[in-house]
Structures are given as structure tokens and as C-alpha cells.
Amino acid sequence: MDLSAGLSLLPLLLLWSMAPQARPQRSHSLYYFFMGASEPDLGLPLFEALGYVDDQLFVSYNHESRRAEPRAPWVLDQTSSQLWLQLSQSLKGWDYMFIVDFWTIMDNYNHSKVTKVGVVSESHILQVILGCEVHEDNTTSSFWKYGYDGQDHLEFCPKTLEWRAAEPGAWATKVEWEEHNLGARKNKDFLEKDCPEQLKRFLELGRGLLGQRVPPLVKVTHHWTSAGAFLRCRALNFSPQNITMRWLKDDQPLDAKALTPEDVLPNGDGTYQSQVTLAVAPGDETRFTCQVDHPGFDQPLTVTWEPLPSRALIIGVVSGIAIGVLFLVGALFLILRKRKASETMGDYVLAECE
């Protein structure tokens, strides 16, 4: 992933686990990832934001530059538009809000230490995901979640204007925010009004570019570990993220319990990757095939592991080629020798024997 576009891979994957997955193909989404580290030794900024439309990165922002940077071709010429200016102001506001919330949560965990030289904090990470979806029937849904040090922390409920604590350590922050009604009404308005309206406008800008179907590159590989042999089926660089992967044995689907499913992960460029792994008995590898279904395919694709030729076969093939080359060289040598002799004799031709 392009480091200038956002976060390091591991923190991004932690955020991605908080995002809604497997959306219906005809629904559309707009969401923002926020993350920051309390100490710079983690290699992360105090605040960084990534914005996605239909899982395609279109904007990034960080606390150091305080600038919204376009990350998709369909917004490059919109940086002076009213929509982009509003987005830039929103990101600056979220920057401030994030840092205040970060310190509140750390204080409630007693993760800040006050010394003679000031406040010195331990290294911690705060993550936020917020956004909305517009479904095929024009109904909407929304989400606003906090994660702290890689664990679910708080989730906002727009209908009740309350915060749901995901674990006991979040209770103090929940009570504090609800008692002071900090931003609850504003959060609700953004999720239910502003966000769907932004999404519709971004979809208009990206018409023809968003929603492109890019089929995956699928490959099956064989691996050995201390636990035995296994096959890995990888699907790379596909879009959208909707994909189904499963193993077949002798052309019959395997029990789901026999599979090792893995998440669909973003590459950071609008495409995704995924894989499924299967433990196999040595010698049975060719009985298994990987079946992949994706909107970019007219029909499901099946891929089988293709073992490399054995060493003996490779030596035999190479030897055969070498012998063939030698034979060809010899034939060419004889032809050239006869032609040279013919040129030396001029027009004289041997009489045929009667």
C-alpha cells in the first residue's frame, strides 16, 4: 500500500475488521477511517483519515499537513468545488474531535501519566469508523464505532442518541459523553442526513468509474509445513469485494468445516485480495480444485494445482532437445557441404549410371 496515502498495513487491517462486510452488490457506501497513535514511536501520526466510496479510496488527510488530498481520478478536478471544501472542513473538525476523544478515553483508562515535566502518555492507538450505506430500495443504514488498542470500544446508536460500551473499560467514557450529550445530535444528523447526501454526490462524480468489475487473478499453490501439506488458493487484485471461494474434491463441494476461510482484504488501490487454505494428504493434491465466483466472471472459475515436472522428466526433456539440436546441426552441415561442392564443380554434372 502507498504509505503516503494512509496507514501502515496492520493498523488498516484492524480498522477493516470493524467495517461492514459483504454488502449487497447494488448498495453503495461512504465511510471514513480515523486512526492515531498517542506516541510517535509507533510510526503513526496523531491523526490520519481515509475516506472510501464503495470501498474505493478517494481522500486522505493527516494531522501534520491538515490538507485533504484527492486519491481517486474522479475527484482530482474537484478540489476547488464546494463539496471538496466542505469535506476539508469536516476532516479538520474530526481531527480536533479525535484528539479530544483520544485523551478522554486514555484518562478514563488511567493511561496518562503526569510528571514534573508535563503529561507523558504510554503508546496507545485509537481507531474510528463512521459512515453510511444506501441500499437498493433507497433505505439507509449507518455506523459510528470506536476501537481502542485493537479492541471494540464504543458504538453510537443514532435512534437513542446513546453509546453502547463494548467492554467494561468503555463505561466511564459512555457515561461522560451521555451526561454532557457531547455531539450526539450532530452525530445523528451527519449519519442520517449529511452522509447519504455526500454519498449521492460522490456517486454522481464517479459515474462510470465507480463500480467497475475487475475479475481476480486466481492461483493455487502447494506448501509444506511441520503440520503437513496444504493447498492455498489466492484471488488477487479484484473489484468489487464481493467474492465466493470454496474447495471442491472430485468436483464435489467440501464440508465448510474442512476449510480455512480468510477475510477479503483491501490492497489500498481500490482492489482486494483473499485466499482459502486446505490441508491435504500427500498424493491427493490433484483431486482438489478451487472454485471462485465473482461479478467479474460470467461463470464460476475453477483452478487446479499444477505440480512442477519431476527432475527426471526435466532431464529427459532437456536431453531430447539437445539431441534434436545436434541432429539439426548435423543435417545443416551436410547440406552446406554438398552446396559448396556443387558450386566448385560449376556446370559439370555427373552422368547417371545406365
Image: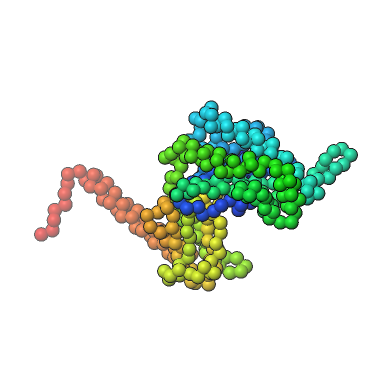
Q: Position of residue 351 (x, y in %)?
A: 13, 53
Q: Position of residue 71 (x, y in %)?
A: 54, 37
Task: Look at 46% across and 47% down and name the residue there.
Answer: 138
Q: Residue furthest top?
A: 80
Relative to 323, 285 lies left or right? right
Q: Position of residue 346 (x, y in %)?
A: 20, 43
The colouring scheme, among rainbow, by chain, secondary structure or one colour, is rainbow
Instruction: Reply above or below: 282 against 233.
Output: below
Instruction: Reply above or below: 67 against 213.
Output: above
Relative to 23, 129 lies left or right? right
Q: Residue furthest right?
A: 116
Relative to 102, 195 lies left or right? left
Is residue 292 something that shows in the picture? yes
| Quadrant (top left/top right/bottom left/bottom right) for the C terminus | bottom left
Relative to 310, 47 lies left or right? right
Q: Position of residue 35 (x, y in %)?
A: 66, 44
Image quadrant where residue 166 sits = bottom right
| Quadrant (top left/top right/bottom left/bottom right) for the N terminus | top right
Pick the front one: 131 or 22: 131
Pick the front one: 103 or 68: 103
Task: Look at 23% across and 44% down and name the residue there.
Answer: 343
Task: Look at 60% across and 65% down and name the residue there.
Answer: 225
Is residue 268 something that shows in the picture? no
Instruction: Tell me how many marks there are.
Output: 0
Pick the front one: 234 or 244: 244
Task: Look at 16% across and 52% down and name the residue there.
Answer: 350
